[in-house]
Image: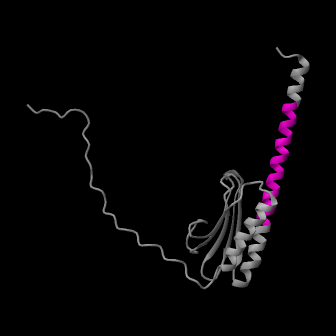
Amino acid sequence: MLDPIQLLALVVIAIAAGIYASRSSKRVRRADAAFFATLVERVTQALQPKGFKLKDQIYLPQSFGHRIATFEGPAFLVDVTWDGREGDLALFRRDPHTRHAGNGEKVAAVHVFRGARPNVQAAALGTILSAVQRIDPQEPLPTPPPQPIVPPAPAVSLTLGAPRRSR
């Protein structure tokens, strides 16, 4: 059985741990937001001379903190996506008629977990910016391979149980 003083000490430790975790989580969210804002700013600076402009920027906190920035160019869109759960930071080129970010040609990808150290973030920023420099706004998007025509499946009739005998 625990002494009342020991019980009180455990409660105080539990409360302190909760406060620390809450503050740490907020600090990580702020640092991640600052990193992505810096990334978007630098990508914007690199893409503007090529005729691109920032079209949309989305943060989805209910979806593990996914972040998406979309840039509109003369012939295609460029998306910078950061999967808040898996830590995948990617750069895509896609057709302006597709609805979803990430449904295009992956130009670059790097892994950056939430709350990553500044040197990891700097390396990721360098990888993405290097790929942005290689984007040619006049280069056409690759054409997707033709989808095979699949005939509809024949109708199937299932009979459950034993077959009936006719008399």
Q: Is residue 29 above or below residue 99?
A: above
Q: Nearer the viewer, residue 59 or 44?
A: 44
Q: Nearer the viewer, residue 111 or 34?
A: 111
Q: Is residue 35 magenta?
A: yes
Q: Residue at x 76, y 61 (%)?
A: 120
Q: Is residue 62 above or below residue 5?
A: below
Q: Is residue 3 above or below residue 62?
A: above
Residue at the extreme right: 5
Where residue 30 sits, quadrant-wise, is: bottom right
Residue at the extreme left: 167
Residue at the extreme top: 1
Quarter placement of the N terminus? top right
Q: Is residue 39 magenta?
A: no
Q: Give the main secondary structure, helix, strand or loop, of the magenta stretch.
A: helix
Q: Is residue 64 above or below residue 130?
A: above
Q: 42 left or right of 85? A: right
Q: Nearer the viewer, residue 88 or 45?
A: 88
**Could you tell me residue 74's position as x and y percent?**
63, 83
Q: Residue at x 16, y 33 (%)?
A: 164
**Could you tell me residue 56's position as x and y percent?**
70, 69
Q: Residue at x 82, y 57 (%)?
A: 31
**Could you tell me residue 136's position as x and y percent?**
63, 83
Quarter placement of the C terminus? top left
**Could you tell me residue 36's position as x and y percent?**
76, 64
Residue interval drawn in magenta: 13-37
Q: 63 left or right of 9? A: left
Where residue 126 sits, quadrant-wise, is: bottom right
Q: Nearer the viewer, residue 165 or 14?
A: 14
Q: Residue at x 63, y 83 (%)?
A: 137
